[in-house]
Amino acid sequence: MLAWFARKTTTAQWTIPIIGGVALLAAAYPRFDVPHLTYAAPPFYALLAVGITAISTTRIRLPLFLFASLLTAIFTLYPITRYFSETPLESNVGTIRAAGSDIALLRGLRSNIPRGSDLFVFPYLPIAYFLTLSQNPTRYSYLQPGMMSDADESAVLTELRAAPPTRVLYYNIPEEQILRIWPHSDPTRLRMRRIEAYLAEHYKTSNEISYQGGSFRVMERRPVTAALQ
């Protein structure tokens, strides 16, 4: 359909949405699930509508219209069905809704990390700072395994040593999971060994929060005397 429409169209008015839609699809790779495809769908709605109206044969136009309506309904029903599957929860930022394993994570954050405390999340869950209203001692909201440099790791270590947080939220992301979600990650930099060594030396696990088959470890700072032993 897009190939036919692009061949018939010569104006930038319609060429640009085609390019934009394809770019949005490419940006969603490799996570072609309903939420990510929803972000890429709007340009195609407009293009599909214009393409259908350009077809003069009713016998062809009507089935295409019904097909397009079905696609639109699928993407419209997703947020509706998701809403009714979610549970309202009280949090530090007000009432929020969650479903599945997110419920346990949100409850675990609220019960294990006091509101407004100083916290370092490693390597990846930037929303935890918002949900706990905590203070991040480093310049980064998250550390992206396989995409950040030695200089980034060094900067974080310097800031952690200058202002050690009371708690750390640590998730040991399997390397195969990183490569599956972010396939262009540098396979030689999937672990930030120096930060992990620092956390192991200066922090101990106080609790765990289950999440999607794994768990986040809530770590608390060791007493200074214990850290020096």
Image (cartoon, helix red, strand yellow):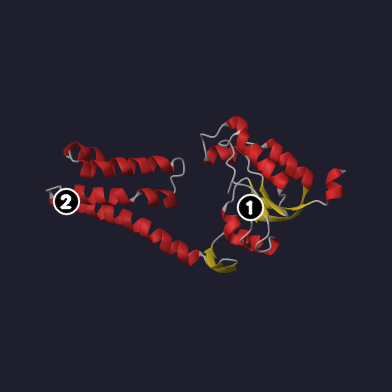
Looking at the rendered image, the quarter that the C terminus falls into is: top right
**Residue type of the residue flagged with mark 1:** Asn
> Residue at (65%, 62%) from the top-left corner?
116
Q: Is residue 96 above or below residue 219?
A: below
Q: Residue farthest to the left?
A: 56
Query: On the rendered structure, is 177 left or right of 157?
Result: left
**Foreground: 59 or 144?**
144
Q: In the drawing, does residue 201 fall left or right of residue 169?
A: right
- Of 153 and 207, which appears nearest the observer? 153
Q: Is residue 148 left or right of residue 9?
A: right
Q: Position of residue 108 (x, y in %)?
A: 66, 61
Image quadrant in which you'd find residue 13: top left
Residue highlighted by disc 2: 53
Q: Amino acid at mark 2?
A: Thr
Secondary structure type for disc 1: loop
Q: Quadrant of the N terminus?
A: top left
Residue sitting farthest toward the front: 162
- Cα distance, mark 1 to mark 2? 54 Å
Mark seen at residue 136: 1
